[in-house]
Amino acid sequence: QVQLIQSRGEVKKPGASVRVSCKASGDTFTDYSFTWVRQAPGQGLEWMGRISPYNGNTHYAQKFQGRVTMTTDTSSNTVYMDLRSLRSDDTAVYYCARDLGFAELSLGFWGQGTLVTVSS
Amino acid sequence: EIVLTQSPGTLSLSPGERATLSCRASESVSGSYLAWYQQRPGLAPRLLIYGASSRATGIPDRFSGSGSGTDFTLTISRLEPEDFAVYYCQQTGFSPETFGQGTKVEI
C-alpha cells in the first residue's frame, strides 16, 4: 500500500531554512504529483504547492514564491520541501500528500506530518 | 484565487443525527475537482470524497457528497462517535488549490 514517511520535527531560529523530506513507497513514484500542505497551530489547512516527479514541474502558492523550493529524488523516491527565511508564523505542521490517482488531483495519501517550530 | 467558504463554522449535533456541511466557491469549480477531507485531532487529514460525489476507498456509505458550480455539500446521514472531527473542502481545478476554512462537527 502507499506510504508517505516524513522526516522528524525541527526547531529553527528566525531567518534560518528548513528542509522537510517525504519518502514514498508502494507505487510508481513518477506516476503521481505530490503536494505540500501546512497547518499552523489551531488553524486550517494551507496549500503550499505541488511537484511532479515525472518532469520536476512545480506550482507554488504566490504567498511562498521566492521562499519555497520543492524537489524530488527519483533514485530514493523522496520529495523535499525547502523553506527559507523562516519567521515565527511559519511554525506549523507540514504535510506531504500524493494525488489519489492518475489525473485525479485530490489528496488520497498523506504523510504523518512534520512539526517545524520557529523560535529564537 | 478561488475562495472556498464553509458553513457553518461549528455544527453541534448528537450521535445518530444527520449533518449537512456546505462549501461555497467564489467562482465556478468543476465538480471533478472538489474534494472533502476529515481531520481528527492530532492526525493527518483523510480523503472522504473526490470528484464532488465519489467516496474514497474504505469510506462508509453514510458519507455522501453532492453539488456543482459554486455550491457543494457533504452529508453524514447518521453520525457515529468517530465522525466528530473537522471537515475541509478543497478545489484542485485551479492553482492555488485552495481549502475551505473548515467545519467542526462537535457533540
Image (cartoon, coloured by chain):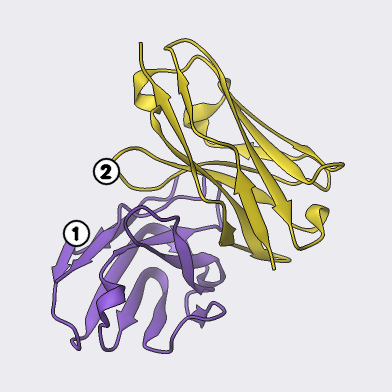
Chain colours: A yellow, B purple
Amino acid type at mark 1 = Gly
Quadrant where the N terminus of chain B lies? Answer: top left
Report the front residue among A111 and A108.
A111
Hey, which quadrant is residue B5 in on the image?
bottom left
Does residue A30 appear left or right of residue B48 in this picture? right
CA distance separating discs 2 and 1: 14 Å
Element at label 1: loop
Query: Residue B43, how many percent across, how many down?
Result: 41, 56
Q: Which residue is mark 2?
A: A42
Nearer the observer: mark 2 or 1; the answer is: 2
Q: Which residue is mark 1?
A: B9
Does residue B39 appear left or right of residue A23 in this picture? left
Query: Residue B104, how many percent across, how many down?
Result: 23, 62
Report the front residue among A2 and B93.
A2
Looking at the picture, does residue B93 appear above or below residue A15?
Answer: below
Label placed on residue B59: none
Does residue A16 appear left or right of residue A35 in this picture? left
Residue found 66% across the figure and 49% down from its top: A34
Report the front residue among B5 and A24.
A24
Contact between labelled residues 1 and 2, with CB atoms less than 8 Å apart: no
Query: Residue B3, how many percent across, how many down?
Result: 37, 50
Amino acid type at mark 2 = Gly
Element at label 2: loop
